[in-house]
């Protein structure tokens, strides 16, 4: 290393202590060394390099030990401005003095030692001049502090000669308020005392030895700013000091007239209480409030109505609408979901997720990539997942787009699915949302990366996607539903819900990361399937073989594509579109209900029952979901037909016969086809009243019961009381009806579906079973 010359002409090297782990700052420092912790948009280390360059240094050695590559990678050219950098890695711990000796070797002149993880603006030139003038063997830079108990203190006389040291004393021993800043100037005489290749510490070994040898140790009281960002409180306070101008440093951007640094244009609906820092490529929605001391780093998002007070958001963090953050830290890539609250000192580690309306109490740390469930109140640190949740819940793999469901994650899911069936063709499709389309592309790329071929059905809706899978005889497919609560629905053969075996395989491959890899020549193909919409419309027409002339209805759906397809089809079949009866199709096309002015809404389960009875009257057995109305079984008995029920997520092939039949009866899970069949029945029988008179009167009431843990114990008690074939949940025959009790797929709750002669009776049955569950295991059942 060549010897730089300071402003006063005194040759001096600089050694930056950059090996700190920052254990008290974890989880912030779980994946970065402490000097790389960002302060107002830049790593702390850069501010120290600025200071060295300002005072004439042209070379610096950095002692690195913890995650050393993260520092070296940040300076790929081995320089910073005009400052040449040399990285010296410790292969074994050498202590503070030992690491400096390792970095310096034999020096002809002195060396300046400075910490890479403490912010300061001291006049280094004045410190070096003082050292030379005093003829010191060591100059220790000190700073007056208010509470001396947290620092190593220096006891010096009026002329600055060091008399001794006190390490983090009680007030009774705090005879000095001068804290050791860890900034030293060492002459060659001091360096020569440090052994090479051994663990050696400045405060514990070198300085006591020098005092014993009566060498000249001088104390220089720094008059500028100094802050050791050793804990979260100091880390946040330091950045407020920077914004308030209490430290002389170069914050990215320009200070506006209110005192803030805002590098990205904010909307008029965003309220800012200066000073704040807002980085580049930040998106903040209307109604958000940024209060004094807030730092929003590059690429972050803040939702409408969120309030961020004196908190730090590191790059690519996500704070959803109406969240509340008070003097807390959200690390890189972490997410705080809608309505969640973080109190003073709370930290969310990199990639962590705080669920909707969850609360993280003051001082609580959520470790990297850990998830806090919705509505949870967290009072202790979270280092492991709170609950062992699988990826799948009752709607598939669900979450918020950009939080749980990212393009990276979808590519991994795609690679997992492709790895399971490298010889197959896999279907992909998505709802008409831009975000869902992006995730679909990532999903397809993941599948293709394993050499598996993709059939892309484009933007449609779930019912049409299932029909397309069934028509093309595809073994696996993924439909991506966008919107506020997004989902990846994995489908099996015939467009039916995937089996548990398939879900477990996806989870296992994702957890292990053991994806099939292929060369650039063997990547899978992607085939666009634009013609399936025409085939789907043809299927709808087949549901009304004699047309719909003479009928008059309205058609409604919140999905304009669904509404357009259904309206066009019924109109083509001769149906007038100005009637009082309204057919409403769900957004994904899987459910249908009918509004009749004199009766109100006729719900999906009744229409399903009518259509099933219609098929059985034609001599057909029917395949239905396991939770379809039991009233259909009663009608099947009268008509001499069978009802075969397939499970939503079977663990074995016990429902194989039902699934085979269901492949030929896509109407049972398609609201548009059911709507067409309903209109066909209405035209045949002449009125809604006639349809009602032809099927048993029944109604269904459903509720979800939170069990606070695994629902298996409740179900075990119920199944022991009424033994039988294991299906999905337990079916209870009670006075006046039936009750199906099903566990939620991720545990923690039960779904109760009560079916009875009237909605009032069904509600009573539902409430009765709900009370039994809340009390504990029922001792007996009817």
Image: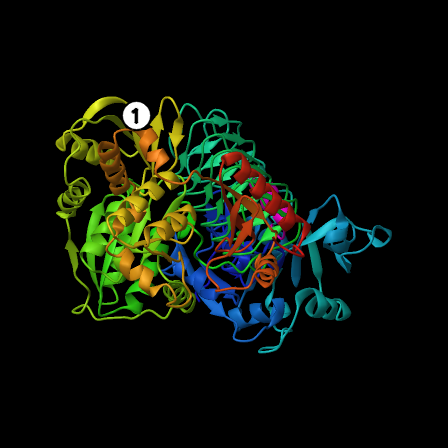
Q: In this view, does 374 lie above or below 502?
A: above
Give SS at disc 1: strand
Q: Is residue 47 above or below residue 30?
A: above
Q: How many labels does the image show?
A: 1
Q: Mark 1 = which residue? A: 581
Q: Nearer the viewer, residue 247 or 209?
A: 247
Crowding near the residue tagged with mark 1, few <14, some 14–19, many ≥20 C-alpha atoms within 10 Å: many
Residue 383 lies in what quarter of the image?
A: bottom right
The rendered magenta stretch, by its main secondary structure, is classed as helix
Q: Does residue 706 show up magenta in the picture?
A: no
Q: Nearer the viewer, residue 556 or 718?
A: 718
Residue 133 lies in what quarter of the image?
A: bottom right
Q: Which residue lies furthest to the right in this view?
A: 172
What color scheme is it? Answer: rainbow
Q: Can you see residue 492?
A: no
Can you give x and y, in whole percent of width and height, for residue 348 in the image? 54, 49
Q: Can you see residue 526?
A: yes
Q: Does residue 236 show up magenta in the picture?
A: yes
Q: Which corner quadrant holds the N terminus?
A: bottom left
Can you give x and y, in whole percent of width and height, for residue 261 in the image? 46, 33
Can you give x and y, in whole percent of width and height, for residue 543 in the image? 20, 42
Q: Is residue 132 above or below residue 261?
A: below
Residue drawn at point x = 46 percent, y = 61 percent = 727
Q: Is residue 537 left or right of residue 681?
A: left
Q: In this view, does 399 lie to the left or right of 354?
A: left
Can you give x and y, in whole percent of width and height, for residue 212 in the image? 77, 70
**What's drawn in magenta, residue-wise?**
229-239
Q: Nearer the viewer, residue 540 or 561?
A: 540
């Amino acid at each position: 290393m060549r010897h730089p010359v300071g402003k006063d002409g005194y040759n001096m090297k600089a050694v930056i202590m950059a090996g700190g782990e920052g254990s008290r700052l974890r989880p912030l420092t779980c994946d970065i060394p402490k000097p790389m912790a960002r302060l107002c948009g830049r790593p702390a280390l850069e501010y120290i390099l600025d200071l060295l360059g300002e005072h004439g240094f042209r070379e610096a050695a950095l002692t690195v030990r913890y995650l050393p590559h993260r520092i070296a990678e940040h300076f790929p050219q081995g320089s910073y401005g005009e400052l040449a950098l040399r990285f010296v890695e410790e292969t074994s711990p050498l202590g503070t003095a030992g690491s400096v000796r390792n970095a310096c070797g034999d020096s002809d002149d002195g060396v300046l030692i400075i910490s890479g993880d403490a912010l300061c603006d001291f006049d280094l030139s004045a410190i070096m001049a003082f050292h030379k003038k005093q003829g010191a063997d060591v100059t220790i830079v000190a700073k007056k502090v208010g509470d001396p108990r947290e620092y190593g203190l220096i006891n010096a006389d009026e002329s600055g000669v060091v008399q001794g040291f006190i390490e983090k004393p009680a007030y009774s021993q705090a005879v000095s308020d001068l804290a050791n800043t860890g900034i030293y100037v060492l002459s060659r005489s001091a360096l020569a005392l440090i052994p090479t290749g051994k663990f050696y510490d400045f405060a514990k070994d070198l300085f006591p030895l020098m005092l014993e040898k009566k060498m000249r140790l001088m104390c220089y009281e720094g008059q500028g700013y100094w802050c050791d960002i050793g804990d979260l409180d100091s880390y946040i306070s330091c950045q407020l000091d920077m914004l308030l101008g209490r430290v002389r440093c170069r914050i990215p951007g320009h200070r506006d007239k209110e005192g803030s640094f805002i590098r990205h244009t904010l909307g008029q609906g965003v309220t800012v209480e200066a000073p704040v820092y807002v980085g580049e490529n930040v998106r903040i929605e209307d109604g958000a409030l940024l209060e004094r001391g807030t730092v929003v780093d590059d690429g972050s998002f803040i939702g409408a109505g969120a309030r961020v007070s004196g908190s730090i958001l590191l790059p690519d963090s996500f704070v959803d609408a109406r969240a509340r953050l008070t003097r807390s830290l959200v690390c890189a890539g972490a997410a705080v979901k809608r309505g969640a609250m973080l109190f003073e000192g709370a930290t969310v580690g990199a990639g962590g997720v705080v669920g909707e309306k969850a609360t993280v109490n003051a001082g609580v740390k959520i470790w990297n990539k850990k998830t806090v469930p919705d509505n949870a109140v967290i009072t202790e640190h979270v280092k492991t997942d709170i609950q062992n949740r699988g990826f799948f819940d009752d709607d598939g793999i669900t979450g918020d787009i950009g939080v749980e469901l990212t393009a990276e994650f979808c590519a991994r899911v795609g690679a997992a699915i492709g790895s399971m069936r490298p010889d197959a063709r896999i279907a992909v499709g998505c709802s008409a949302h831009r975000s869902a389309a992006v995730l679909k592309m990532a999903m397809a790329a993941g599948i293709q990366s394993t050499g598996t071929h993709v059939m892309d059905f484009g933007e449609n809706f779930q019912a049409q996607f299932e029909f397309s899978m069934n028509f093309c005889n595809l073994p696996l497919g993924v439909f991506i539903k966008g919107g506020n609560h997004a989902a990846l629905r994995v489908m099996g053969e015939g467009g039916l819900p995937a089996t548990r075996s398939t879900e477990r395989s996806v989870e296992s491959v994702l957890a292990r990361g053991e994806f099939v890899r292929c060369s650039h020549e063997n990547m899978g193909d992607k085939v666009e399937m634009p013609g399936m919409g025409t085939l789907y419309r043809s299927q709808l027409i087949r549901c009304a073989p004699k047309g719909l002339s003479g009928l008059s209805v309205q058609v409604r759906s919140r999905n304009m594509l669904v509404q357009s397809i259904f309206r066009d089809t019924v109109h083509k079949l001769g149906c007038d579109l100005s009637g009082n009866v309204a057919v409403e199709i769900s957004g994904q096309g899987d459910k249908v209900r009918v509004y009749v002015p004199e009766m109100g809404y006729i719900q999906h389960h009744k229409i399903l029952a009518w259509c099933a009875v219609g098929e059985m009257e034609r001599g057909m057995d029917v395949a239905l979901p396991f939770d379809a109305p039991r009233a259909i079984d009663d009608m099947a008995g009268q008509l001499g037909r069978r009802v075969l029920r397939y499970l939503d997520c079977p663990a074995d092939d016990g429902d194989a016969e039902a699934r085979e039949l269901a492949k030929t009866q896509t109407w049972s899970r398609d609201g548009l086809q059911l709507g067409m069949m309903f209109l066909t029945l209405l035209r045949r029988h002449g009125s809604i009243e006639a349809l009602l008179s032809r099927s048993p009167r029944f109604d269904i009431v459903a509720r979800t019961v939170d069990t606070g843990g695994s629902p298996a114990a409740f179900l075990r008690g119920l199944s022991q009381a009424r033994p039988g074939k294991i299906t999905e949940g337990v079916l209870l025959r009670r006075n006046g009806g039936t009750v199906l009790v099903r566990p939620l797929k991720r545990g923690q709750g039960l779904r109760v579906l009560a079916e009875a002669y009237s909605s009032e009776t069904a509600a009573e049955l539902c409430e009765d079973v709900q009370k039994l569950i809340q009390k504990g295991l029922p001792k007996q059942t009817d």
